[in-house]
Image (tube, rainbow, N blue to C red):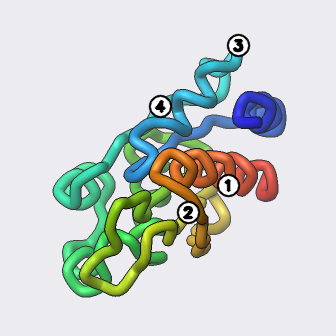
Amino acid sequence: MKTKLSADVLKALEGKTLATAESLTGGGIGNAITSVSGASKVYVGGIVSYVNRVKRDLLGVPEEYLEQLGPVSAPVAKAMAVGVRKALDADVAVSVTGLAGPDGDEFGHRVGTVFIGYADAHTAFAREYRFEGDRAQVREQTACAALALILERN
C-alpha cells in the first residue's frame, strides 16, 4: 500500500518539491517515497527529529510548545512541517509526531496518538489521528496517513 501511495504522491507533486520531518516513523516516510523510481525529481529529503533538541534546533519548534504541550501535539506537528519546508527549501512538507508504544506520555496521550503536520506556500496545519495496533502497525498507519494527506492537498 505504501508503494502505491508513494507513487501517487510523486505523480501528484510533479513540478513541486517535498520534504519530510519524522519522529515516530524514524525515516519511514522518506524510505517509502525513495523506494519509487524517480523520487529524486520531487523528494529533496527529510529530517528525523526523534528527540526534542532536534525538533527545536533544526526545525524551529518553539521550546514552550515542547515544555507545555509535549512533543506529541498539533502545534509541534505544524511547526515541524513549517520548519522542514523552510530548512530544506521545499514546496510541500509533511511531518509526523506521536506515540508508537509501548507507553503513553506524561501529557496523557495514549499509544497510537499521532499528529500529522502539513505545510505549503498557502497553508500550514496539523491533524490528530488515533491508530490501533502494535508499534510497527502504528508506524505503518502513520506513514500511510501522511502520504494520503499529501495526496489530499495536492
* Amino acid at the residue labelled 1: Ala
Disc 3 + disc 2, Cβ < 8 Å: no
Mark 4 in CB contact with mark 3 (< 8 angstroms): no
Tell us which disc is closer to us: 4 or 3.
3
Location of mark 3 (residue): 37
* Residue 68, position as x, y percentages in the image: 24, 86
Q: Which residue is mark 1?
A: 145
Q: Earlier in the sequence, mark 3 or mark 1?
A: 3
Q: Give the quadrant of residue 69.
A: bottom left
Q: Earlier in the sequence, mark 4 or mark 1?
A: 4
Other residues around mark 3 within 10 Å, as few (<14) / some (14–19) / many (≥20): few
Q: Which type of secondary structure does the marked residue at label 2 adopt?
A: strand
The image shows residue 7, relative to residue 128, as above or below, that is above
- Which corner quadrant of the image does residue 4 belong to? top right
Is residue 108 found left or right of 122 in the rendered image? left
Mark sitting on residue 131: none
**Position in image of residue 100 (x %, y %):** 43, 58
For the N terminus, the quadrant is top right
Q: Nearer the viewer, residue 67 or 57?
A: 67
Q: Secondary structure at mark 4?
A: strand
- The residue tagged 2 is 116
Residue at image point 32% right, 68% down: 103
Q: Are marks 1 and 2 in contact (CB under 8 Å)?
A: yes
The tag earlier along the polypeptide, 3 or 2, is: 3
Cα–Cα span, label 3 and label 1 = 21 Å
| Mark 4, residue position | 45
Q: CA distance from mark 3 to mark 2?
A: 25 Å
Q: Residues within 10 Å of mark 2 (few under 14, many from 20)?
A: many
Determine crowd level at label 4: few under 14, some 14-19, many 20+ residues with C-alpha closer than 10 A.
Answer: many
